[in-house]
């Protein structure tokens, strides 16, 4: 279910937001403020994804004896700008925004100046904390500012299918503009040339940056943070050519909408291959020394890319997914269930229930795709099939048959496991949690709502691919090049314990790997306090310098060896 019902929502966002009913992040702090007029920015956190909402309160006007406030809403990721808010109601330290979506936000300003409340839409409510800013965009301390001591230019290139055109930024050293001699010497060292100001031509190693889950711009912008702008600045100053690109469907990267609807992680691999081919055409790039650095999902794309072609010199994985898609989803949910202070028994039951409901969704999807009606007394036992001659698997009748089958299978599974008290508690908890959403969406029951939700996960291209993925295979087969894996110990989106276990397997299979786990860092590799997702945006630090130092040293050493 979409949190914001907007017709031009990117398909990946649609798939991510389906997890909404299971994810409830906690709330963190910001600076104290007094006025209402200005910008209130916050991020809805859904299954590890962040959807930035920006409310703009205009200066009040006096109409008769009444002070009237008017507001608008921006949702950059969904290309929504200056959306008129129907009503802005302010009473003391409380504010309510009502929109025609229909949706609303109601919150209260606390002592620290945070606006703490809930976004409500379709009968569902999600915690949302907003931070005040007098201007639309705040600049974090690490974000680079012009003039740059290197060349930075906008570039574009096409997808081999001809259905997409990408826009990005290419940065590369220019020794004629470098004022610091040590940096110029480093650049010439990487270029393997003797410094000669009269000869500015040189070939340098290149790094392609790949962003995390969901549609991201070339800077991997998250709130006011621009991690890839920071990385590009750092690596270019070291002497590398750096390419960062808007994801398909974002910014300057546009294409056939129908083509975009089927986007999966594998789709991003083909996009990365197009970016590599573009780097081949650049006169300053040494095509024998091209590295790929990915964050989160981008790390998994980088590994797939390196396994697909042998000319990648190395891979840097920044908090890449290292457990299966199902277990990653379970881990992220467990973090949020713990934040809700649920007891360990209930969390264990919810985890098992979540795994089973995903499995059932794929079973139903398979049965309905092949035209079979299934009859089974449990979710994992033998299944008898009866041929269904219906040719259109997307008809309302087929959809109704799918949810009906799912409900039957789930009921059978719950009945079969009557002795599992934690599972029984979890099932009741999930049903109670879904009652309101069922009424709001017109579902026949809470069980019917859950069936629709989980079948949606299995049928959506991105979530289907994600939930069936197993990164261990790609990581352990990475024999064409070395890899640097970086993980934060406080990451609440990727399980650091699972990463360490995978690293052991990679060492056993002979993968050339360097692994560093950094204590006290979150998924964005920031030093954190609560370390939950909502805290990302309040921290001034974009990326920990010790991480950047390790990456820079690793890249430099690999270039000396090649």
Image (cartoon, rainbow, N blue to C red):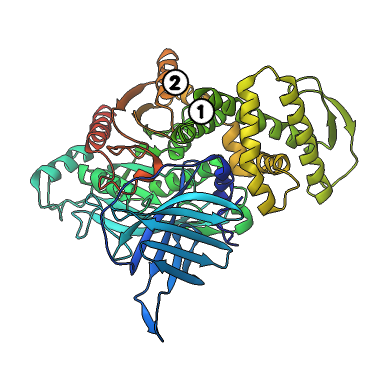
Mark 1 is surrounded, within 10 Å at the Cα level, by few (under 14), some (14 to 19) or many (20 or more) other residues, namely: some
Which residue appears at 38% of the width and 70% of the height? 57
364 in relation to 87, above or below: above
Quadrant location of the C terminus in the rendered image: top left
- Secondary structure at badge 2 equals helix
- Secondary structure at badge 1 equals helix
Q: Is residue 336 left or right of residue 523?
A: right
Which residue appears at 81% of the width and 36% of the height? 370
Residue 83 appears in view: no
Task: Please state the horizontal and vertical placement of residue 91, each as a whole percent of the image.
Answer: 40, 66
Task: Please state the horizontal and vertical placement of residue 226, each as a whole percent of the image.
Answer: 32, 51
Q: Is residue 395 left or right of residue 494?
A: right
Which of the numbered marks, if any, corresponds to residue 471?
1
Which residue appears at 38% of the width and 49% of the height? 220
Which residue appears at 44% of the width and 46% of the height? 277
Residues at marks 1 and 2 touching, judged by CB atoms closer than 8 Å: yes
Residue at image mark 2 = 502
Which of the numbered marks, if any, corresponds to residue 4?
none
98 in relation to 21, above or below: below
308 in relation to 279, above or below: above
Mark 2 is surrounded, within 10 Å at the Cα level, by few (under 14), some (14 to 19) or many (20 or more) other residues, namely: some
Task: Please state the horizontal and vertical placement of residue 102, each as a whole percent of the image.
Answer: 59, 63
The Cα–Cα distance between marks 1 and 2, rounded to whole angstroms, is 9 Å
Task: Please state the horizontal and vertical placement of residue 320, each as a whole percent of the image.
Answer: 42, 33
Q: Nearer the viewer, residue 264 or 430?
A: 430
């Amino acid at each position: 279910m979409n949190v914001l019902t907007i017709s031009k929502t990117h398909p990946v966002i649609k798939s991510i937001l389906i997890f909404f009913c299971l994810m409830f992040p906690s709330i963190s702090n910001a600076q104290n403020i007094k006025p209402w007029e200005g910008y209130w920015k916050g991020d809805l956190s859904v299954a590890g994804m962040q959807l930035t909402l920006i409310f703009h309160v205009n200066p009040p006007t006096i109409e008769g004896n009444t002070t009237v406030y008017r507001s608008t809403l921006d949702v950059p990721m969904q290309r929504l700008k200056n959306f008129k808010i129907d009503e802005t109601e302010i009473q003391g330290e409380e504010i309510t925004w009502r929109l025609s979506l229909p949706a609303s936000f109601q919150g209260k300003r606390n002592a620290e100046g945070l606006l703490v409340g809930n976004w409500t839409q379709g009968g569902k409510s999600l915690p949302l904390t907003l931070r005040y800013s007098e201007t639309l965009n705040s600049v974090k301390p690490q974000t680079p500012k012009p003039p740059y001591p290197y060349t930075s230019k906008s570039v574009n290139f096409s997808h081999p299918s001809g259905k997409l055109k990408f826009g990005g930024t290419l940065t590369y050293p220019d020794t004629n503009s470098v004022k610091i001699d040590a940096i110029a010497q480093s650049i010439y060292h990487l270029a393997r040339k003797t410094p000669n100001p009269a000869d500015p031509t040189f070939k340098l190693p290149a790094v392609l940056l790949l962003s995390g889950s969901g549609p991201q711009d070339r800077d991997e912008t998250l709130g006011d943070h621009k991690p890839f702008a920071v990385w590009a600045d750092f690596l270019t100053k070291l002497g590398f050519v750096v390419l960062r690109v808007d994801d398909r469907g974002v910014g300057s990267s546009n294409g056939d909408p129908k083509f975009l609807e089927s986007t999966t992680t594998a789709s991003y691999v083909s996009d990365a291959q197009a970016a590599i081919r573009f780097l081949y055409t650049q006169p300053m790039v040494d095509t024998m020394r091209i590295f790929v650095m990915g964050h989160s999902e981008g790390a998994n794309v980088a590994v797939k890319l390196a396994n697909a072609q042998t000319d990648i010199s190395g891979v840097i994985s920044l908090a890449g997914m290292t457990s299966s898609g199902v277990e990653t989803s379970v881990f992220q949910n467990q973090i949020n269930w713990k934040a809700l202070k649920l007891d360990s028994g209930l969390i264990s039951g919810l985890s098992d229930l979540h795994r089973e409901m995903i499995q059932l969704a794929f079973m139903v999807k398979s049965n309905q795709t092949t035209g079979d009606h299934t009859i089974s007394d449990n979710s994992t036992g033998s299944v008898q099939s009866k041929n269904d001659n219906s040719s259109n698997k997307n008809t309302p009748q087929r959809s109704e048959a799918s949810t009906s089958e799912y409900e039957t299978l789930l009921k059978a599974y719950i009945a079969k496991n009557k002795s599992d008290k934690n599972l029984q508690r979890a099932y009741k908890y999930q049903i109670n949690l879904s009652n309101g959403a069922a009424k709001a969406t017109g579902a026949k029951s809470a069980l019917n709502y859950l069936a629709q939700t989980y079948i949606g996960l299995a049928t959506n291209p991105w979530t289907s691919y994600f939930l069936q993925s197993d990164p261990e295979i790609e990581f352990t087969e990475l024999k064409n090049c070395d890899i640097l894996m970086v993980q934060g110990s406080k990451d609440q989106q990727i399980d650091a314990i699972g990463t360490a276990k995978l690293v052991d397997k990679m060492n056993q299979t002979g993968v050339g790997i360097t692994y560093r786990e950094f204590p006290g860092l979150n998924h964005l590799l920031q030093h954190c306090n609560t370390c939950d997702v909502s805290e990302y945006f309040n921290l001034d630090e974009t990326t920990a310098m010790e991480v950047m130092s390790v990456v820079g040293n690793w890249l430099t050493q690999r270039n000396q060896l090649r």
